Amino acid sequence: MCWLIYKVLEIVGFSLKNIALTVGAFLLFWIVFLGFRFVVWMLPQAAAWMLRPLWRIFATWRARSLDRSMPAVERELKIALHREMCLLATLMDRFSSELFLEKELPPDIRVVTRRVLLDRLRDIGLRDELDGPFLDILLAPDGHWTVEQKSRARHAVECFSVLRWVLGLGELRGLTVDPKYDLRTTAAVLAVREPERLLVRPSWDLRLARDSTDLFLTRCWIELLARKAVMAFSEEDVEKAIRALTLIKEEGSQHDYLVGTHTISEIETPGVGFLFNRALVRFRLLSLLVEINAGREPVHELRAFVAQIFSPSPEPREA
């Protein structure tokens, strides 16, 4: 076909050189035209990507300026919350060390011994304030936590994530996303030297997260009730849960929470139980922090809450 077109053009009077120049000009035109369109389309996006760090810096600077002139959270409360966060970070370091001691350690892992942790608490003035479950956990020999203690401590991972977010030191991952924990996050908490400058979230911001958590918690609770996976509840409560679950299914999967690639109705009962327990810990902690940041509860209630995490597991809430 190409040979036939070439012969026709040759008869008409086009030489090979003219044909090559014509085709080359045609291709060059489209390359320039499409390249120009691509540049015009990409320029705003590239500018936005380049300016995003500057905007983040400006937003942080503006938030700090507003916080200095009209603080939403008082300076003393920020310092007190950070102290409790340091205690929890120390407990998380001990929890991580206990998990690492269960198996052969890779060369890049360093176990933090109890002596180091106790010295750290003494340096920040918390060692002499501890009693009850905190002393039982921190004074236990390295590698001697019981299975029950490790199981309870897993709930503290959620507490740590929530408190990091409240103190403005990290993001709060959704309940439909697997929780992540990194030893570097505890180091970042302990590295704060001026906690009064932290952008601690006020109570009205925490209410939004609490209410969102409550919706997710209720959805998991309905699922567990409908499957009769929760004991000591009346048949009337179970029937209500089944009716609510039927309504959710009738509306379609797009109205249900998506955890990974499955809706809550498609998850096995142990998985739903894990989601429920995680949401329950987050809901209770956010509810407490709303009251603390609003000045209606003292900060020491936060330490009592963390102590309960390392005590026997709390009972499920009533419907």
Image: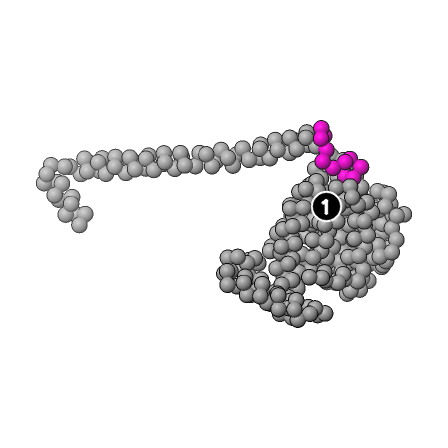
Q: In screen coordinates, is 43 left or right of 273?
A: left
Query: Can you tell which quarter of the image residue 59 is in?
Result: top right
Q: In screen coordinates, is 244 left or right of 252?
A: right
Q: Which residue is mark 1?
A: 290
Residue at 71% from the left image edge and 49% from the top image edge: 286
Task: Indicate whether residue 209 is drawn in magenta.
Answer: no
Instruction: For residue 51, say whether it is visible.
Output: yes
- Please provide the residue range marked out in magenta: 68-78
Identify whether 42 is placed above or below 86. above
- Give the residue type that dot 1 points to: Val
- Residue 136, image x and y in percent? 86, 58
* Quadrant of the image containing the C terminus: bottom right
Task: Indicate whether residue 77 is drawn in magenta.
Answer: yes
Residue at 54% from the left image edge and 63% from the top image edge: 247
Mark 1, other Cα within 10 Å: few <14 / some 14–19 / many ≥20? many
Residue at 68% from the left image edge and 45% from the top image edge: 206
Identify whether 118 is placed above or below 258. above
Question: Residue lying farthest left?
Answer: 11
- Residue 181, image x and y in percent? 68, 52
- Residue 128, image x and y in percent? 90, 47
